[in-house]
Image: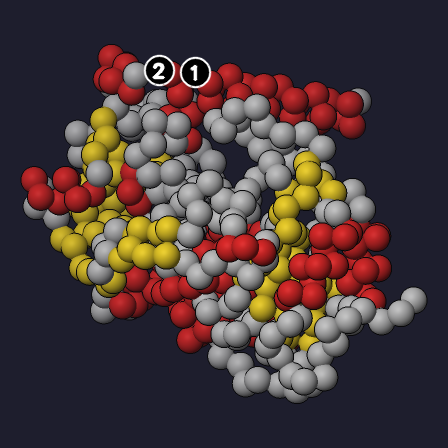
């Protein structure tokens, strides 16, 4: 019975999420002000402001770690002709980033939504920002606020409790801002951080020496009322990462270059996997690539120190590129249903030349506000061969093959 109910439950939840997404996209946000009470009792925050406006009109602390920056990412080495499959192309624009010091603020749920007095949501600190389709507006009922005395550091971030990429980069990565602004663990009484299961996450936390007795791992319904909240900025903008994210991990997880160089394939199993996975892996083996699954691994900076070229299927496993050295060349295999710039920006910020092959997803969203279909996709082998040749045409040692081995 349980095996039958679980798929049905997932379908119902998916249907409900889509109904919400379509409804919220067209519902004026001012409607939330008509609800009784505040988000401390139920529902989403009734008001919202961007951080730049809010700090001009309120007495708050703000420590700057990085100035605003705008520019262009290097164009991918593949596809040819300088084209990109990304809607926003190569342009990036990051706001000033640092750490806010807020009094009497609340943190909602494991996603870490930051809410200040008068029930004002500061979306800049969260994934999705102040967008009207931010998932903060999906909130219904949550627990009563739990009082946290003293100073609280909020490292929670949307989706980071269930997705390793968001946990590693969006959540834990904010420690770089915390350190850059002169704070240390002695300055805080508690740290809000989603718990992510697995050996790799445990290894990261142990290596960074976060004090276990100060860690609070929120659940989906938790809410916290903080006497003083240290709220770091979101790292970059959604789907684009600033260079400091990569530099943070390279500084804390250094590794010497090792020889001989290796070619590695980050495969993916489960949702958004390849329909022709066996053929792709066979092709990559002919070019000298070995399969490597970073999930559950430790000492990744050492294990990847001799890797010069990577082919990886789009997914959270590619977040481990932060443990690779500058100059590592990366080719991402991406489903057409999710043409997002997460790893393009990560590679560009980490000085890792990037290329991408887009494969056709079996199902695709009809509207950009739809949830991803998570459907498998197919990579055309003829295009893959050309892209691998471009990947191996530069970088690495002289003995890296640029033509495949004969079967």
Query: Which residue is at a point 52% across and 50% down the rendered structure image?
Result: 83
Colour approach in the figure: secondary structure
Judge left or right: residue 366 versus residue 399.
Answer: left
* Residue 167 visible in the shown view: yes
Q: Residue 344 location, x and y as percent?
A: 50, 55
Q: Residue 181 location, x and y as percent?
A: 23, 65
Q: Residues within 10 Å of mark 1 (few under 14, many from 20)?
A: few
Query: Which residue is at a point 38% across and 38% down the rendered structure image?
Result: 128
Q: Residue 266 location, x and y as percent?
A: 68, 60
Residue at the farthest front position: 81
Q: Nearer the viewer, residue 277 or 331?
A: 331
Total marks in image: 2
* Residue 145 visible in the shown view: no
Dots 1 and 2: beta carbons under 8 Å?
Answer: yes
* Element under disc 1: helix
Q: On the rendered image, what quadrant is the C terminus found in?
A: bottom right
**Quarter location, residue 6:** top right
Query: Which residue is at a point 51% across and 68% down the rendered structure image?
Result: 352
* Element under disc 2: loop
Residue at the farthest right position: 407
Q: Residues within 10 Å of mark 2 (few under 14, many from 20)?
A: few
Q: Which residue is mark 1?
A: 23
Q: On the rendered image, what quadrant is the N terminus found in?
A: top right
Query: Which residue is at a point 49% across and 62% down the rendered structure image?
Result: 347
Q: Which residue is mark 2?
A: 27
Give above or below for 138 relative to 113. above
Q: Nearer the viewer, residue 384 or 327?
A: 384
Q: CA distance from mark 1 to mark 2?
A: 6 Å
């Amino acid at each position: 019975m349980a095996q039958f109910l679980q798929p049905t439950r997932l379908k119902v939840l998916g249907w409900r999420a889509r109904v919400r997404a379509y409804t919220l996209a067209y519902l004026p946000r001012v409607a939330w002000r008509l609800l009784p009470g505040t988000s401390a009792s139920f529902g989403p925050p009734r008001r919202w402001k961007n951080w730049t406006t809010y700090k001009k009109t309120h007495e708050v602390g703000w420590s700057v770690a990085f100035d605003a920056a705008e520019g262009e990412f290097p164009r991918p080495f593949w596809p040819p002709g300088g084209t990109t499959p990304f809607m926003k192309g190569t342009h990036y624009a990051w706001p000033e980033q640092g750490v806010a010091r807020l009094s009497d603020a609340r943190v909602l749920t494991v996603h870490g939504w930051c809410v200040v007095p008068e029930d004002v949501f500061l979306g800049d600190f969260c994934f999705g920002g102040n967008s009207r389709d931010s998932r903060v507006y999906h909130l219904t009922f949550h627990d009563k606020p739990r009082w946290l005395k003293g100073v609280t550091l909020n490292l929670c971030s949307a989706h980071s409790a269930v997705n390793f990429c968001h946990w590693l980069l969006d959540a834990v990565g904010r420690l770089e801002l915390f350190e850059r602004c002169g704070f240390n663990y002695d300055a805080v009484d508690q740290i809000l951080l989603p718990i992510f299961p697995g050996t790799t996450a445990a290894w990261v936390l142990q290596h960074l020496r976060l004090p276990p007795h100060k860690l609070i791992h929120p659940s989906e319904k938790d809410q916290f009322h903080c006497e003083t909240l240290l709220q770091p900025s979101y790292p970059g903008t959604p789907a684009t990462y600033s260079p400091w994210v990569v530099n943070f991990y390279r500084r804390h997880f250094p590794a010497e270059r090792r020889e001989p160089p290796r070619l590695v394939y980050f495969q993916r199993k489960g949702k958004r996997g390849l329909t022709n996975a066996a053929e792709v892996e066979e092709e990559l083996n002919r070019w000298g690539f070995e399969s490597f699954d970073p999930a559950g691994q430790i000492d990744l900076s050492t294990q990847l120190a001799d890797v010069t070229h990577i082919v990886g299927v789009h997914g959270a496993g590619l977040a481990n590129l932060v443990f690779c050295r500058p100059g590592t060349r990366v080719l991402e295999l991406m489903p057409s249903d999710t043409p997002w710039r997460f790893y393009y920006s990560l590679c560009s910020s980490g000085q890792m030349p990037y290329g991408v092959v887009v494969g056709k997803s079996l199902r695709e969203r009809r509207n950009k506000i739809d949830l991803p279909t998570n459907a498998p996709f197919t990579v055309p082998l003829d295009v893959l061969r050309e892209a691998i040749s471009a990947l191996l045409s530069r970088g690495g040692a002289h003995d890296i093959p640029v033509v495949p081995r004969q079967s």
